[in-house]
Image (tube, helix red, strand yellow):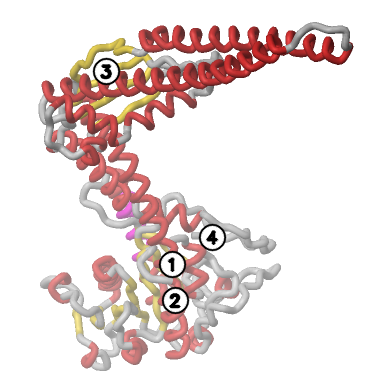
Amino acid sequence: MTTDSTAQTSAAAPLIDLQPLVVAVRRRRRLWATMALLGLLIGAAMTVLMPPPPTAVTKVLVTHQEDQPNDPGTLIRTDVALLGTTRIAEEALRALKSPDRPEDFIGQYHGAGLTNNLMQITVTGDSDAQAVARAKALADAFVADHVKRMRDTANAEAQALLDQRDRMRTELAQVNKSIGSRTPGSDPKASANIETLFARRAELTARITDFDERAAEARTGTPKLIAGTQIVDAPRVVRHSVSKSALTSAVIGLVLGLVLGLVVASVGAVVADRPVLRRDIAAHLGASVISELPASSRLGRLWQRRRTRAARERLTTTLARTVRGSSEPLSLLELGCARSTGAIALALAEALAADGPVAIVDGLPGLPLADSAGPGGPTVVSGERARGGSPEERRFGVGSVAPGATWIDLPHLGARTVLVVRAGHGSAAWLHTVARQLAELGVPVIGVVLIDPDPRDRTDGTLWDGPPTAPRGHNGQARQNEGAASHPVQAVGEGRRRTERLPRWAARVPDSDQEAR
């Protein structure tokens, strides 16, 4: 991993950085993919194990006295609401001679307004015959109730008109009586009063005739409305397709499971606060990412396994060069990837075996590194035997900085360390803790090996103000080990200033001639 010698200008941090969240959600694709698949299977299984009950449907044409061409559907919505009343349900149950309660029966059917005058009634039952019978009883009960309400309304309107007519007739009789009791004379006032009475009689006679006509019209229009309200589609059984229902339920379950999985993954990523980008991991640990290794997978394609093997060989060469170019011991400290760290340690010991005997100080809890080395492999010693051995023997340690690690034993594994960290394993707070503990122990971190990085991560994992002992680059100057030992990892909260010169570790890496020596 190389860097340009030209300093880059610092960019303003965005107000909302969704890249870590997107990467964290994508890395949890097993979670939301599993939940989506589970939702699909549950949706399909519910259709098969819990089929819909037998259902019947019928359509009723409903006419209203107040029908208007521009009616927005208020009248039919009123009819649908009336269908769901206990009065209609009770009349239907009475016709069916059913002992069920009207309140319970209301939940087994529903109405829907198809147009301003067409209503559809859907009813469920224990069998197809019962569903059809219930649909017919409901339709008949609604039609009878609607007809009764229209008749009552018409009769009430007609009776009101006739009552008004009768009052007019009573007043007309009084006017006629007043006219009959007056005799014509020469008095002008008497003549004016008689003319007023005649005018009033004519007006009352006209109004009485109008009320008679309106009452007749009110009664005449009712039979037309009654005849228009009828069942236009006889009750019939609704046939359910199991395959279509299962497909629909499966798609709905898939969508719901996927949405729920994405929400859980997003909330979990925010709450856990586990950095996955190399930029964030390097910033929290205070050390640059020097290498990356994909997660080992037995199902990986051939070229992916070749790429992984090539990356491991490059990392082994870099670590071997670092061990040969320094008199101070090196340690590999893992965080969330003990097996990968053990494999890296065995590969490094095999590369160093050509120069002489090699010993690995095993500080990994729960990982039998000696069994993995096998017969004829490098010597694996425990922590209490770390100070023994011949001077010609090369030693490096393997340990862990996972929660529960014994910090005071880490300096015995090596004066310098390379952290092997799995992306998305440790929280930001724990990465800060690791950097702070190693700085207090005086163990500089010369680099970070990132395990299982995000393949779409394009962030920069290089710190320009990082430790001066990172194993990168080649030039003609020798590594200054004593300066490296006295340069602890800087506090994570410090600013990463960028300069116009090469990073400090660029002039401290041995060249190829020194490596050969």
Q: Tell me the mark number nearer the camera, choosing from 3 and 1.
A: 3
User: What is the count of numbered marks?
Assistant: 4
User: Given the image, on which type of amino acid does mark 1 rest?
Assistant: Asp
Would you place residue 117 above or below residue 395 in this image?
above
Would you place residue 390 above or below residue 379 in this image?
below
* Left or right of 402 on screen, residue 273: right
Q: Is residue 357 visible?
A: no
Q: Earlier in the sequence, mark 3 or mark 1?
A: 3
Residue topped by disc 4: 460
| 381, 214: nearer the viewer | 214
Which is the main secondary structure of the residues drawn in magenta? helix
Q: Earlier in the sequence, mark 3 or mark 2?
A: 3
User: Given the image, on which type of amino acid does mark 2 rest?
Assistant: Ala
Residue 273: which disc? 1
Residue topped by disc 3: 58
Magenta-drawn segment = 306-316
In the image, residue 18 lies at what x, y percent?
52, 55
